[in-house]
Structures are given as C-alpha cells and as structure tokens.
Amino acid sequence: MSELGLIAGSRKFPLIFARAARDRGYKVVAFAVRGDAWRAINKCADKVVWLRLREFGRLGDIMKREGINEAVMAGQISPGRLFSSEVMRDAGLREVFAGMKDKRADTIFSTVIRHLEKSGVKFLDSTAFLGEMMPERGLLCGPEPSPEQSKDIEFGFKLAKEVAGLDIGQTVAVKSGAIVGVEAFEGTDNLIRRAGKIAGRGFTVVKVSKPRQDPRFDVPVVGLCTVKTLLRCGAACLAIEAGKTLFIDKEASLAFAERKGLIITAV
C-alpha cells in the first residue's frame, strides 16, 4: 500500500480528500495543523501527526522520517496566523518567509511547497481524486438568473478573473452592476458578510479559479458553510467557475439552497 502525506488545514476538504485517497488504496498520513485542522481527521486518516504552526519548519524532516514521498495540501490555514508571533518563533519558517518577495497566497504556498520538495516530497494536485465534486457548466439549483443577475454574473466573472490574476482573491460580490466587495486575505465568508452589510439583500457572489491556478494548493472551494453564509447575509445568487471549483457536500448544499430560493450556477 502506497503512503500519501496530507497537510491538513481547516474545514472538510482534508477529511474528504483523506477518505477518497483511502478508497483508492492509499495509506494516508495526515500532518494536521493545530488550531486549524478538525479533530475528525483522526477518524479519516490512517495516522495523524499533530503540528503547531511554529513547528512547520521541521515538516520536511518529519515527512522523511515517516517515509512520505508524495503529499497533498488541503484545507485553509487561518490567514491571520501567518502574521502571528508563533511563526516568528520557528527558525525554519523564518528562513522560508525571509526569502519571499511578497506575502501573497501563491507566493507563500508555492514557497512552502518548494521548501518541502527539497526533502524529496512530490506534491500532487489536491483535487486528484475529487473530479466528480467539481460541477460542469449549468444551473445547479434555483430559478434561472434574471437578466440583471445574468449581467452581474458576467461582469463579476470578468472582474474576479482579473483580481484572481493579481493573487488578491478569487471572489467578488456584485449588485446592479456595482462591485460591492472584493475578497482579499480574509476569505470568502468574510467577503460575503461585508457585502451583506454594504448592499443589503439581493447581491450576487462570483467565485473563480486563478488564470494560472496551481492545483497543488488554494483550489476554489464552496460548500454548505458558504451556502448558509450567503443566505444569512442576504445573497440571491452564487456563480462558480465550472469544472474548476470544488463543491463540498454538494447534494445537501443544493437541497438546502433550493428550499431557501438561492440561485447557484456554474459558469
């Protein structure tokens, strides 16, 4: 049985990936980030090594010791932690961060991967076993978008691609032809909350992949938490990029959104 390392961040993505990899015959060794990874990873992986963020500089050595030659990165590290004192307490992380030209998400995660690959670990596409969870083009639930919403989706998609190309964020909120929110380091849910406060009810959220997306990390993800946040904040429509967005808990999410009248479409 081949061993596969899994750097596990927050939410369900690492749990789903671990189950899918095991179903395909891999022994999954999870390196779970304390403070971000869910305890449920203990039930989904064959072995779990819990690490504090400040211990991340030793991860290459730990993977070597565990005999890991291939690995995947799944789930988010809380953005605010990257600026905390715990990062500065680790000599290895300080060295990694010191060589970065900037602190954009792509720069951070690609630098971390390059650092770990020096230990002989090859990183795989984080959606390698999850293709069926990436919806193809079409209306997923709710009524057809109105002409105004269709215009907002088209406008938001184009702008989101430009913003994503600059590695600022991958999501925008639009209402009546106006951009009311652009995702930055705070993440999609916080963007949605801001948009709700600014625009009130009836706005549209558009989420895309980056033009030069590295599938080894930072794949666009939506799920039931996203749907609940959208509804709580008054959104009317969610548009995701077809074939490139991971939809976690898709059936439950779409059933819930349908009952509540939320439009979800893949474009």
Image: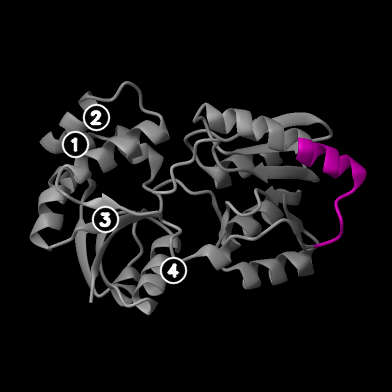
The amino acid type of the residue labelled 1 equals Leu
Q: Which residue is mark 2?
A: 97
Residue 35: x and y, percent? 31, 54
Mark 2 residue crowding within 10 angstroms, few (<14) / some (14–19) / many (20+): some
Disc number lying in front (3 or 1): 1
State the mark number for residue 16: 4
For the residues marked 2 and 3, what is the alpha-carbon distance in whole angstroms? 20 Å
Pick whichever of labels 3 and 1 is earlier in the sequence: 3
Q: Report if the CB atoms under discs 2 and 1 are less than 8 Å apart.
A: yes
Q: Please report the residue visible at 61 percent of the width from the left and 28 percent of the height from the top.
A: 162
Question: In the image, which residues are magenta?
Answer: 142-154
SS of the residue at dot 1? helix
The secondary structure that dominates the magenta segment is: helix
User: For residue 64, which quarter of the picture?
Assistant: bottom left
Pick whichever of labels 4 and 1 is earlier in the sequence: 4
For the residues marked 4 and 2, what is the alpha-carbon distance in whole angstroms? 30 Å
Residue 91: x and y, percent? 11, 34
Q: Which residue is mark 3?
A: 34
Q: Report if the CB atoms under discs 4 and 3 are less than 8 Å apart.
A: no
Does residue 198 appear in this view? Answer: no
Q: Please report the residue visible at 56 percent of the width from the left and 65 percent of the height from the top.
A: 133
Pick whichever of labels 4 and 2 is earlier in the sequence: 4
Q: Which residue is mark 1?
A: 93
Residue 49: x and y, percent? 19, 63
State the mark number for residue 167: none
Q: Report if the CB atoms under discs 2 and 3 are less than 8 Å apart.
A: no
Disc number lying in front (2 or 3): 2
